[in-house]
Image (cartoon, rainbow, N blue to C red):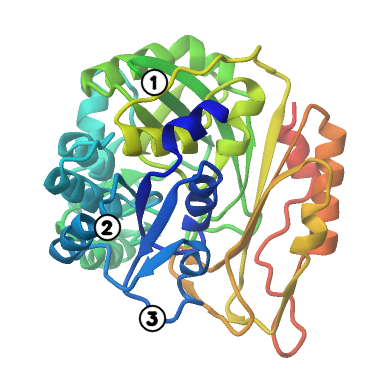
Amino acid sequence: MDLLKQNLAGKKLLVLGASVNEITLVERAQEYGVYVIVTDYNLDYNLSPAKKLANKAWNISWSDIDELEKKCREENIDGVIAGYSEFRVENTIKLCERLSLPCYCNYEELEFTRDKRKFKERCIRNGVPVVKDYKTVDSVDEFPVIVKPVDRGGSIGISIAANKEELEKAYKYAMDLSVCKDVIIEKYIADCNKFDAYYEIVNGEIILAGTDDVINAKNNALKKVVQSGWILPSKYQKQFGQNVDESFRKLIIDLKIKNGYIFFSGFADGKGNFMFFECGFRLCGGHLYNYFPLVGYYDNLDLLLEYQLTGKVTKQSIKKIDERLKCLTINLYSKAGTIKELGGFDEIKKIEDCKFVLKNANVGQICKEDEAILSKLGMVYFCSNSNEKLLKDTDLLYSYFYARDSYGNDLVYDRIEQSELKKFLV
């Protein structure tokens, strides 16, 4: 931290976006003595809470490149960063080009990560296994299938079809929400575990920082798939290292990525077979930067902050990897309703193994169920070598946390059962 503070102190950073997720960027940069400006068009700072914490806030859309360029030159900005959204990354690239500032990502890499079709084509070229897809509605020969805009993330525009009639409806829904007006239809994988792999690239060195297994909500159906939790490392990590890791390294080299953080999503069948369908070349919503250093890897938040502000990444001394340390993330989603009572976060933060807490919602917020998308109430993760402690931590979390409507009804969409957790804590 001392070396990073030496490199970053006094620099000025512009963060594109000011949501609750950007709070982590603001606070971490400020720890290193960086002067932080955030920007979006919201005048209501309750909708953009990072504006309350930043050194300065602009009420300019993060997509208004002309106005941002002008303001950045006036303010002598040293770097621009965006996390959690490919569209913000695109505007980061544009703004950095105009200002001649460093940027870890270029247009080719961005298109690979946000266009699901281009992603799969590049994967096939490098030997990465992918999920089967269909070129047209009429070519679908088995159900169910999952239908997605090729250029949207975060479950936007995604739905599952069990028959031809539902497929046509799902296709239109996805097309309406696609910016580039392109849709991909894939085989719906129901008999495998959802699996993610995370890589850090530092000065050309490719590091497999972690893998996870996804715990889906117990009341999932074809209408929605909700990820109630993630566990790192995956119980399939050894199989992944033996069977797929080399192909992903070829893929990253093929993309000519020298610095950054990239994650891949797919499925594992438990027999050593994997298939992948998308990736992100940006900060991920799991906020794993507190976990990775504990197992001996780079802090991916620091990695991107340093590169965007200086154009380089300082090589860190990596400690001995603690392969036994596990990270259990619990996502808290809401049923449809208006939040009257919401709390428990302060108590959860005091749990010994708690390494991260994020409060996403507020009292008075109207939560909706829109196809595959649910309103998020919060996210917490615990780190421990002990399965028993992680099980206890989960029980404590659910005992402290509450979200209720004006009638006293419980709004929490899903609570992971101990029996389900034990399947992954091996």
SS of the residue under disc 1: strand
Q: CA distance from mark 3 to mark 1?
A: 38 Å
Under mark 1, the amino acid is Val
Instruction: Please report whichever mark, 3 or 1, sits nearer to the chain's N-terminal start.
Output: 3
Q: Residues within 10 Å of mark 3 (few under 14, many from 20)?
A: few
Under mark 2, the amino acid is Glu
Residue at 33% in and 26% down: 312
Does residue 211 sit above or below 249 in this rendering? below
Judging by the rendered image, the residue that carries numbered circle 1 is: 202
- Front position in the image: 145 or 184: 184
Q: Do we see residue 338 in this rendering?
A: yes
Judging by the rendered image, the residue that carries numbered circle 3 is: 43
Q: Percent from the top left, x then y, of residue 217?
A: 63, 54
Q: Percent from the top left, x then y, of residue 400?
A: 83, 63
Report the mark closest to the observer, 2 or 1.
2
Q: CA distance from mark 3 to mark 2?
A: 21 Å
Instruction: Please report whichever mark, 2 or 1, sits nearer to the chain's N-terminal start.
Output: 2
Does residue 245 sit above or below 184 in this rendering? above
Do tag 3 and tag 2 residues touch (Cβ < 8 Å)?
Answer: no
Instruction: Please report whichever mark, 3 or 2, sits nearer to the chain's N-terminal start.
Output: 3
Q: Where on the picture, by quarter, is residue 265?
A: top left
SS of the residue under disc 2: helix
Q: Where on the picture, by quarter, is residue 362?
A: bottom right
Judging by the rendered image, the residue that carries numbered circle 2 is: 75
Residue at 56% in and 81% down: 365
Q: CA distance from mark 2 to mark 1?
A: 30 Å
Q: Percent from the top left, x then y, of residue 255?
A: 22, 24
Q: Is residue 5 left or right of residue 276?
A: right
Q: Residues within 10 Å of mark 2 (few under 14, many from 20)?
A: few
Report the mark closest to the observer, 3 or 2.
2
